[in-house]
Image (tube, grey):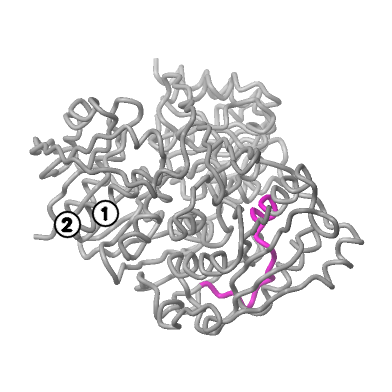
């Protein structure tokens, strides 16, 4: 079984994010592996561990796929140190400012070039928060779409997931190949071991550009984006609110506040 | 005048308030056609409820495949009619389902996509609030039909009633949309409180409840509010996952959000930060949630909430 895990490098969740010319400023902030993608890496590891393992002597492979600037290698390295076998990074100056359509196009192209049975993604990135790329990859590949998985069971070329969303819980099943996205409650991602971190330094990381994928630069990046930002402005910081310490009348003070604000 | 499609949304057999919100935005742009995707035999009953806002037409498409094949089947059918009619825009409610649907339709119809808009102007400029509420972005789609998802509760629905013409259309779902099958479905349990994403007021509980949501529910019921929960509370099994507010739960934007015993992890804040007024009750004066509070009480929710509930009762009487 060959599994691809799509990951993204994002600004640290706790860092202040700023816009620069309608695009997120990624230069001035610490970049990390998207938290939610760690669950995807972990789930891939658990699936292969239940089916004979990966790496030396294992019957399965896990390939990390990412798109981004060169420093994306740092985020990818973390996934490798958790236990993935190899990585493919697509990096190209023309990709800057790509929308979800272009991102899904590039990732789908890389996936098409491999022999993958499953693609596993996190449900969203903590920066753009669109939650659409996994579904769009599935749509582009015309593969089964099994998204928002709260559990994944792989058995004899078929995948069964429980889809957990605000609309309830669905059990869904499909034959390989399939695109899965996993929600954060699915597992507890492992910390890379020292051995894992050392081993990751020797694992193959293939760098591809758009030309090697056969994608025209005009189809991606700001040039190929089918939505354009008219303007982006920081919102004024929230004015400091009232903070009181409950002296036995905190509940009453709260009600008074609701009355003043006309909620009562 | 240009044509705008809106996807009618239903909670069980009842039309959702968000359908009126989509129609309200759509009517600013052009003539609104509401699309109803229904199980066989259910279309007429659903379509008859789509009357809120200026709606010119309701198009009903019935298929057993919508329930059986999830997002892919609905996307295939909607992409087909978008490709045929080329409306100026297709508006869909933001939800896990709605956003994935929008993404797939954008791929299938070669159209631009904007998710989680809080407003859409007559010029088809969408407003988004991004990065945890720190920036406002205006953007527009520059190719194809504008596929836009609109956050619930962001637009005040037009209460004007329409009596639109109802058309039944037949569109088959292709085999390529049938790769993943829904084997069983468990809808969220309804308990007589407002739907979380539609509620004007939400009272939420977190780790600080220690599993006892009693005071939270009592206060919520007195305010006619929905009950939310943090991930800590749903992971502990104290409250159903369908009530989770935050990154992997629901994104809400009510008039009033009352956070009880919730520390305010960034994942929770991401789901409630744009609430108009935020009230916080927490024992820990250093809890990050206080940074968002318009009114914060440092105290035990088990004494503050019951007293507040008594206060609300007294105020009402």
**Bounds of the magenta span?**
A24-40
Q: Residue at x 54, y 39 (%)?
A: B245
Give the total number of marks visible in the rendering: 2
Question: Is B195 in front, or is A112?
Answer: A112
Toward the top, the furthest residue is B317
Nearest to the eye among marks 1 and 2: give it: 2
Question: Is A251 in front, or is A213?
Answer: A213
Q: Which of marks 2 and 1 precedes in the sequence?
A: 2
The local crowd at label 2, few if under 14, some if 14 to 19, many if 20 or more residues have their Cα within 10 Å, is few
From this view, report whether residue A72 is shown above or below residue A132: below
Q: Looking at the image, can residue A121 be seen? A: no
Residue A18 placement: quadrant: bottom right
Q: Residue at x 42, y 40 (%)?
A: B254
Question: Is B158 in front, or is B185?
Answer: B185
Residue A187 placement: quadrant: top right
Question: Is A227 in front, or is B215?
Answer: A227
Picture coordinates of residue A85 (x, y %)? 76, 63
Q: As drawn, is B255 to the left or to the right of B13?
A: right
Q: As drawn, is A86 to the left or to the right of B193?
A: right
Q: Which residue is mark 1?
A: B90
Q: As drawn, is A72 to the left or to the right of B166?
A: right
Q: Which residue is mark 2?
A: B85
Asked which secondary structure carries label 2, the reply is helix
Residue A75 placement: quadrant: bottom right
- The answer to whether mark 1 and mark 2 are in CB contact below 8 A is no
Toward the right, the furthest residue is A195
Q: Residue at x 85, y 56 (%)?
A: A57
Q: Residue at x 68, y 24 (%)?
A: B211
């Amino acid at each position: 079984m060959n599994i691809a895990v799509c990951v993204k490098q994002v600004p640290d969740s706790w860092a202040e994010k700023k816009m620069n010319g309608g695009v997120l400023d990624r230069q001035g902030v610490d970049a990390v592996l998207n938290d939610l993608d760690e669950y995807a890496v972990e789930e891939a590891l658990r699936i292969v561990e239940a089916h004979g393992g990966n790496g030396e002597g294992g019957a399965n492979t896990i390939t990390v796929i990412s798109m981004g600037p060169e420093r994306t290698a740092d985020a990818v390295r973390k996934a490798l140190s958790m236990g993935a076998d190899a990585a493919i990074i697509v990096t190209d100056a023309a990709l800057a400012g790509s929308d979800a359509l272009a991102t899904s196009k590039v990732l789908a192209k890389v996936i098409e070039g491999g022999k993958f049975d499953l693609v596993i993604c996190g449900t969203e990135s903590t920066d753009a928060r669109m939650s659409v790329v996994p579904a769009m990859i599935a749509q582009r590949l015309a593969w089964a779409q099994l998204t928002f998985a709260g559990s994944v069971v792989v058995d004899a070329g078929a995948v069964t997931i429980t889809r957990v969303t605000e609309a309830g819980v669905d059990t869904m099943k499909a034959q390989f190949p399939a695109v899965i996205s996993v929600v954060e409650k699915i597992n507890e991602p492992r910390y890379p071991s020292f051995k894992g971190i050392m081993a990751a330094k020797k694992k193959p990381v293939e760098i591809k550009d758009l030309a090697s994928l056969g994608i025209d630069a005009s189809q991606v990046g700001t040039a190929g984006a089918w939505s354009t930002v008219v303007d982006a402005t920081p919102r004024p910081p929230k004015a400091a609110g009232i903070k009181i310490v409950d002296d036995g009348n905190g509940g009453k003070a709260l009600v008074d506040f609701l009355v003043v604000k006309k909620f009562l | 005048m240009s044509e705008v499609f809106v996807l009618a949304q239903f909670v069980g057999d009842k039309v959702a308030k968000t359908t009126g919100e989509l129609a309200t935005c759509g009517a600013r742009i052009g003539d609104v056609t509401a699309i109803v995707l229904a199980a066989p035999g259910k279309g007429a009953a659903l379509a008859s409820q789509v009357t809120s806002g200026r709606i010119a037409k309701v198009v009903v498409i019935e298929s057993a495949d919508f329930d059986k094949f999830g997002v892919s089947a609905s996307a295939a059918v909607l992409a087909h009619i978008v490709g045929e009619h080329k409306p100026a825009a297709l508006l869909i409610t933001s939800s896990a389902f709605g956003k994935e649907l929008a993404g797939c339709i954008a791929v299938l119809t070669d159209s631009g996509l904007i998710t989680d808009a809080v407003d859409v102007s007559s010029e088809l400029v969408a407003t988004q609030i991004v990065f945890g509420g720190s920036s406002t972005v205006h953007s527009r789609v520059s190719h194809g039909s504008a596929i836009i998802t609109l956050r619930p509760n962001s637009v005040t629905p037009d209460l004007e009633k329409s009596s639109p013409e109802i058309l039944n259309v037949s569109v088959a779902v292709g085999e390529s949309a049938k790769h993943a099958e829904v084997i069983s479905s468990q809808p969220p349990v309804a308990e007589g409180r407002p739907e979380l994403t539609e509620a004007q007021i939400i009272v939420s509980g977190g780790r600080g409840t220690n599993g006892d949501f009693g005071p939270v529910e009592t206060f919520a019921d007195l305010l006619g509010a929905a009950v939310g929960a943090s991930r800590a509370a749903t992971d502990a099994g104290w409250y159903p996952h369908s009530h989770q507010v935050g990154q992997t739960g629901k994104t809400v934007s009510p008039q009033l959000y009352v956070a009880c015993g919730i520390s305010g992890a960034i994942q929770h804040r991401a789901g409630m930060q744009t609430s108009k007024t935020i009230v916080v009750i927490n024992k820990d004066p250093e809890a990050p949630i206080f940074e968002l509070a318009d009114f914060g009480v440092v105290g035990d929710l088990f004494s503050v909430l019951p007293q507040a509930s008594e206060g609300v009762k007294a105020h009402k009487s």
